[in-house]
Amino acid sequence: MRILILLLFFHCTASFAQKRLLIFAKTAGYHHQSIANGFPALQKLSAEHKFLADTTTDASQFTLKNLKRYAAVVFLSTTGDVLDEQQQKAFEDYIHQGGGFVGIHAASDTEYGWPWYGKLVGAYFVSHPAQQEAVLHVVDPNTIATRHFPLEWKRKDEWYNFKEIQTDLHILMTLDEKTYTGGINGDPHPFAWYHDFDGGRAFYTGLGHMEDSYTDPLFLKHVLGGILYATGTKKMELKK
């Protein structure tokens, strides 16, 4: 009986030690169909790497007490004004206290009236051309979010143009505007990045519009790298 109690204790202790993610996908603007693919894909990815993951579109979960349960919050193609002022304040406090943020695709098409959020995510979406193939350049291959990519990666996605690009970003990948039509950012055109911000950690990728992204192992490893960094599980930069 005593051995059984000890086994249960250690099992419970291990469960409590697991890091937890909140995957948030509220949309007050355009709703990406790929969110339906992203929820189960990110939950599966989390489980494979010993994270617990909750999914929600409910902004009322943004209280500091609740957010403190999570090592990072993933904004999965959120759009528009998704948090009220009280919820915004709770999220700011969460980041100030060392929380993590992962932004996927339309996370940059979110909360234009909240300047702090724009600085956290790193830039705001401004426009995009028709979906088409383009070439991404890996600027820094020596990270857990990019080490698996070829240095030039051609794929089809929805290629965002950005405004208010922050100056403190560590750029991971850039988009080659010479390989498609409709780019307005010039060279360089950042498309994935990370930075330490306001006490916490933030990762963003412009990829993830396409539904098949969430079965693409290259994309999923890219997002996993962002999650590992944002949760404080691993440093982004690999040891040389």
Image (spheres, rainbow, N blue to C red):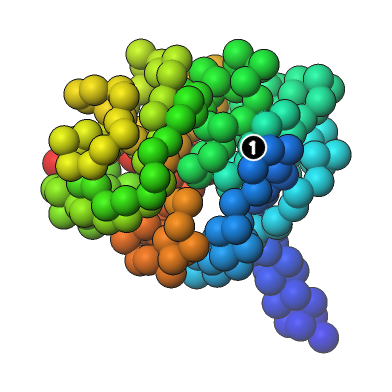
Q: Find residue 179 and report its horizontal and vertical position in percent.
A: 18, 42
Quarter of the picture holding the C terminus: top left
What's the residue at 24%, 23% (across, down)?
186
Query: Mark 1 highlights which residue?
Result: 79
Relative side of 44 to 17, left or right: left
Helix, strand or loop under label 1? loop
- In depth, the one of 118 and 156 nearer the eye is 156
The percent coordinates of residue 187 (x first, y second) are: 20, 24
Q: Residue at x 23, y 42 (%)?
A: 180
Residue 138 against residue 85 in the figure, above or below: below
x, y percent for residue 38: 56, 60
Q: Quadrant location of residue 61?
A: top right
Taking the image as shown, residue 193 lies to the left or right of residue 133, namely right
Residue under the image location 44 percent in, 66 percent down = 212
Residue type (three-letter) at the residue carrying disc 1: Thr
Q: Position of residue 111 (x, y in %)?
A: 65, 25
